[in-house]
Structure formats: structure tokens, C-alpha cells
Image (cartoon, rainbow, N blue to C red):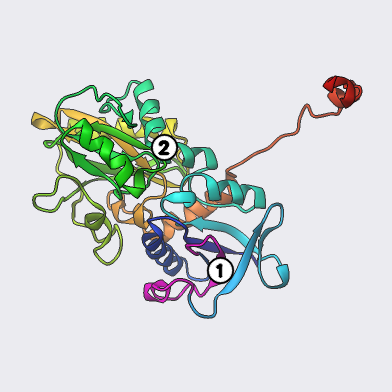
Amino acid sequence: MPKPAVLFGGPSPEHDVSILTGLQAARALGDVTGVYWSKDGAFWEVDANLEAEAFAEGVPRRAGRLRLAAGEGLLGRRDKPIDLSAMVNCCHGGPGEDGSVQGALDLAGIAYTGPSSAGAALGMDKLAFANLVAGAGLPSLPRIALSPGVEIPWDGPSIVKPRYGGSSIGIEVVADAATAAALLTRSPHLRAGAVVEPYRKDAFDLNVAVRSWPHLELSAIERPVRKEGGSILGYKDKYLGGEGMASAPRELPAHLPDAVAERLREMATTVAGLAAVRGIARIDFLAAGDGFDELYVNEINTIPGSLARYLWVEPAVPFRRLLDDMLDEAVRRPSFSWSTQGADGTALRAAGSIASKLS
């Protein structure tokens, strides 16, 4: 009988956090196939009951090599297909969250949780997402592509981010355009592209999770707690507390005026539709001003740390139910649908010779 698989790891700066999320999901589900995606891009079948330490040096002992094949699924020993019902994608950042592995799973014919290839690519591209939000008329801080010699059209400090990145890795606050431009050559996280936006010292983060199945539903609103003196909510604040994002300090539910909470929820619902959210995503906002009257859409995280399980306190949704619903969606609402309608050979029969077309 087919059973679910849990995919974790991946060639990404968030490799280690992805392992934590994957092992949490595997424990909650019970009988699953563990699929470890190593830093060098290989897939391995592993014991899903291993502890995180087993992966500290890479591929754990007694792992079996796997192969992902277009049209054939996931192949194990002697290229025998592994019978899977669907795959829980727990890979944060990089090719696990930018549409790459989603496209590969589509071609392999494997049902999976989380964003589609298109939804993942949109969520990972901070510039494209910002333009989508602005085009829909939702409030957001200005965000532009950072390149050598670019003119920054605002005064004061700025925040520089990797254009393609799923966490706070590589984010820095800078005082001026010259410092921002210097980061382009100094930071390895900005080589694929960078964005810059105004830094608001008075602003703070507000996050809400959204799930798409069996119907659109929002979690409680979270206000993450920054370290004393911290200018941004950094990678260490989020992920290095022992359980990944689940152990980071926070105010949950956030203490907000009812009108602000309602407005944030309306904006989150709109963003979920615009970004074609599938599975569980986390939408991040910034709030500022007296009475939090300034509220901005910041980013979307299509595969959030710990799959945002810690946010489901109002309404209370157990982690196992979140996972079961994601798997149900993966099977009943496929991430892809191809059609060859119209490719009936008419154009080929009327084409004549290829040689004549080249003359």
C-alpha cells in the first residue's frame, strides 16, 4: 500500500533547517518514507526516525541512493519504483522552494504538498512578489533591484536582501547607496540578484499563516520578538533555538487593535489569492505608526519553517491534521495539469518539407 514520503534537506543555505522541519513532519505522520536531499543534489532514502545529529556530517549511515526520473517517479534499488501516495516537501530556500524541485516532481508524476512550480518561483522572487502586491493596490514599502550604480530614490538607511532567498540569510541594513552597492561584490548571497528597500527602524514584524485545504483558513497573528538592539529579525533569532522556527520568541496571538487585525487578515486573504497559495504559507507584514495605522505587505514564505505549525493556536489545528490536509490536497488538487488539445497533427501535415522552410 502506498505511503507518504517526506522530502528534506536540499542544496540551500537553509539545508539544516529543512532537516529539522522534515524530521518534525515525519515524526508527526508516523509511517513514512524519509527522503534526504543532500547538499550535492543527490536523493537518499533514510530512516525517518533518525535524530537531527545523524545528518550533521551529511548523508547518514545505511542510506540508500534514490533516483528521480521523469515519468517514472522515485526509483530505489535496481531502479524499482517506490510506491508513494504523495510527498511532503519540507525544503526551505534554494531549489526546494523556487520551483525547481516542484517542476522535477511534476515531470516525475509525484504528487506533492506546498506551492506549485509557478507559485514557488513567484514567492521566492522578492522583486516579482513586491510588484505583484503593488500592482494589486496593496500597501507595501518601495522595493527596487539593486545593481552597481543604481540610484536609490529615498533618503536614510536601507535594507538589502537577496532577491532569491527564503529566510533572513544575507540581509543587511546599510546607511547609504555606496555601502549597498559594495555588498554586491562582498556577499555570496547576493550574487544571483539583490533588492533594496527603505529601512524603517520604527516598524515591527507581524506574520500570519494561511492554508488552502480543505478551505482557505488563516492562523493566529504572530509578532516575532527581536533580540534587544537588533535591527532586523535575523536567521539566528528565527532558527537557532533548538526546534527551528517553532522555538523562536514571539507574541502569539499578537496584541493588536481589532481593526488592525481585521485589516491584516483581509490583506492576507487577498495575497493568498494573488500568489496562488497551496499547502501552508506564511505571509509577513510590517507595522508602524501610532496605533499601528501603517501596515505593509512584506513577503510570502511558501514553505515556512516548521511548516508554521506553531501559529495554529486560534484556531487550534494539530500538526498531524495540518499534514493530513496537505497530503489530501496534494492528491485531490494536483499541482499541474497538461493538455495536448489542438496538437492533432494538422500543422505537421500542412508543413511541407523542412528543407523548403530553411531556404
Question: In this rendering, is residue 95 above or below 184?
Answer: below
Residue type at tag 2: Asp
Give yes or no for residue 4 being in the magenta stretch. no
Q: CA distance from mark 1 to mark 2?
A: 29 Å
Q: Main secondary structure of the magenta part?
A: loop
For the record, the magenta segment spans 38-59
Q: Residue at x 51, y 51 (%)?
A: 113
Residue 234 visible, this orientation: yes
Residue situated furthest bottom in the rendering: 62
Q: Counting other residues with Cα less than 10 Å from the Cα at mark 2, is it few (<14), some (14-19), or many (20 or more)?
A: many
Residue at x-position 13% and y-position 49%: 230
Residue for point 45% across, 42% down: 212
Q: How many numbered marks have been drawn onto this rendered protein structure?
A: 2
Q: Secondary structure at mark 1?
A: strand
* Tag 1 residue: 44
Depicted 39 relative to depicted 55: above or below: above
Image position of 231 (left or right of 194): left
Residue at numbered disc 2: 125
Quarter of the image for residue 163 reads top left
